[in-house]
Every structure is written in C-alpha cells, then in structure tokens.
C-alpha cells in the first residue's frame, strides 16, 4: 500500500489508470439513468431574466461549483470546474493530493467542449421530448452527468502521463516536432476502444433494467431505461475523442 503522495504517483500504471476509467463508466451510466427520469425540459436551458440573464442550468452549475469550491473540491487535480472564474477559496484545510501531473500540462481543460457537446449534441438525442416543469431536479441531474463526464475525460491527463513515462523515447521526438497526428496515432489503441464501446453498452443494458422478485407474464425486465447504443455512441463520438484530445494537449506541454 502506498503511504505517500510520491509513492502513489510511482504506482501509476496504464493498467491502474484503465481500471479507473472502467470504474468511472459505472458513474456515467448511473448518472445518465438518473437524467433519463426527466424529459428534455427546454426551459432549463434557455436564458431567463429570473436567473440573472443566464439559463437555470448555468445558474445551478455555477452556484453548485461555488459551494463545492468552499469544501475544496477543485484542489483535487482530478476535478475541473466549468466556471473557474471567481470561485471562492476553500474553507477546509488542504488535503495532500498526489501531484502526478507535469506542472506545465496540469492546466489542460476541455470543459467548454464538454458543456457544448452535452447540452447541444448529446442531450437532444438522449432525453425524450417534453417539459414536465421539474427544472430543479433536471439541472441537478445534469450537473452529476457533467461532473462524471469531465472527470473521465480529464483522466486523459493520467493516461498521457503514464504513457509518456512508459515510453519517453517514443513520445519526445513527436512532442518536439509538435506532431499532433503522430501523437494521436501513437496513443490510440483501436482494440481497447472497441471493448470500451461494447462494455458501456452492456452496462447500460444491465444497470438500466427493471428488477422484479417474481416473474411476470407481461414483465418489463427486457426494457431498458436508457438506450445502450446511444451510450456506446456517447463514448465513440465524444468521450473517447475528447479524452484523446486531452492526452495530446497534455503531451504537447510535457517537455516544457
Ligand atoms: O486506454 C487508453 O490507452 C486510453 O488512451 C484511453 C482511451 C479511452 O478514452 O478509453 C483513449 C484512447 C485509446 O485509443 C483507448 C482508450
């Protein structure tokens, strides 16, 4: 068992980082199941004078992040706020998080892309049409989805750091040449991506099923609360490409 931040940082391996990515799939699938309880609820995403000229979703995420900042959430290098400006200082004493990242690479953040992707591309496909007026619970569910997606995608920094440590001789010339295509090729494992896509679809199917103690003739066991193929597509079209984008951006700064 690692006892210090330094030892923890040394224990990092591609296997342990991939295990964490697999565990984080559960959080994302459960967050999506919670969001699926509500229809799209368009008014939650429209600017409103009642919310000071921003949407209820933006107001809620901004205010929630301020509360999270006070208890130190963003001191954890795995957490990235969507609205980093003007966050309050933590009120609790700092925790000694392992400093794993190369300092020049640590600030890579793609939350703007995640925000746009989630609200403008994914959610309209995922949520059923309609408005049940339940905006508070809807935006609270959105926040959990956004945080889980952001944590997973920024985990690309861990992945990039271990890949670099395991093969600096392969990555360094590409970094020096600013060869983003070469870096992307080197860090891509198509077979792993295929497994990820299949596994998240299976998790959506298993976690999203209804469970009954007795067999019912007209049972809804086969029904799924979320569409497994859409979860697979979320990963294929957005989560993995953005994770790789984070990896490339991290590596480009790795020798600074
Ligand atoms: O597992 C890796 O090596 C990663 O870089 C992570 C990841 C992913 O996002 O799941 C991204 C790129 C690889 O092609 C495979 C998987």
Image (cartoon, helix red, strand yellow):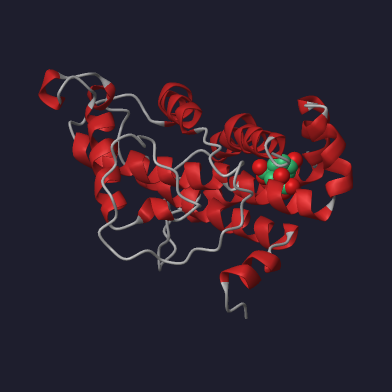
Query: In the rendered view, does 12 fall on the left or right side of 228?
Result: right
For this rendering, which residue is in front, 157 or 153? 157
Q: Determine if residue 208 is in view.
A: no
| Quarter of the figure that contains the C terminus | top right
Residue lying at 89% horizontally and 46% vertically, measured from the top left = 169
17 shown above or below 128: below
The quarter holding residue 61 reads: top left
Query: In the rendered view, does 189 fall on the left or right side of 50?
Result: right
Q: Answer with the quadrant where ligand 1 appears in the image.
A: top right
Residue lying at 45% horizontally and 56% vertically, measured from the top left = 76
Residue 134, position as x, y percentages in the image: 19, 36
Query: In the rendered view, does 114 fall on the left or right side of 129?
Result: right
Residue 40, position as x, y percentages in the image: 32, 28
For this rendering, which residue is in front, 62 or 256? 256
52 shown above or below 256: above
| Quarter of the figure that contains the N terminus | bottom right
The quarter holding residue 252 reads: top right
Q: Determine if residue 7 is in view.
A: yes
Residue 164, position as x, y percentages in the image: 77, 48
């Amino acid at each position: 068992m690692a006892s210090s931040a330094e030892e923890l940082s040394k224990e990092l391996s591609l296997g342990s980082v991939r295990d964490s990515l697999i565990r984080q799939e559960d959080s994302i699938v459960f967050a999506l199941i919670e969001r699926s309880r509500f229809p799209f609820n368009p008014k939650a995403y429209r600017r409103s004078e009642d919310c000071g000229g921003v949407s209820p979703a933006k107001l809620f995420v901004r205010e929630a992040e301020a509360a999270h900042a006070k208890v130190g959430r963003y001191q954890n290098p795995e957490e990235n706020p969507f609205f980093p400006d003007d966050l309050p200082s933590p009120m609790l004493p700092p925790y000694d998080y392992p400093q794993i990242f190369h300092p020049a690479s640590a600030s890579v953040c793609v939350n703007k892309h995640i925000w746009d992707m989630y609200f403008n591309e994914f959610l309209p496909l995922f949520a059923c049409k309609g408005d049940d007026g339940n905006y508070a619970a809807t935006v609270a569910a959105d926040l959990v989805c956004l945080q889980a997606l952001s944590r997973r995608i920024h985990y690309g920094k861990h992945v990039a750091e271990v890949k670099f440590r395991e093969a600096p001789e392969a990555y360094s010339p590409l970094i020096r040449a600013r060869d983003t295509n070469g870096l992307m090729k080197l860090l891509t494992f198509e077979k792993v991506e295929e497994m990820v896509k299949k596994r998240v679809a299976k998790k959506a199917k298993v976690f999203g099923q209804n469970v009954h103690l007795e067999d019912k003739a007209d049972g809804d066991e086969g029904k799924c609360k979320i569409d497994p193929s859409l979860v697979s597509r979320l990963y294929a079209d957005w989560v993995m490409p953005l994770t790789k984008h984070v990896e490339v951006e991290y590596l480009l700064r790795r020798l600074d």
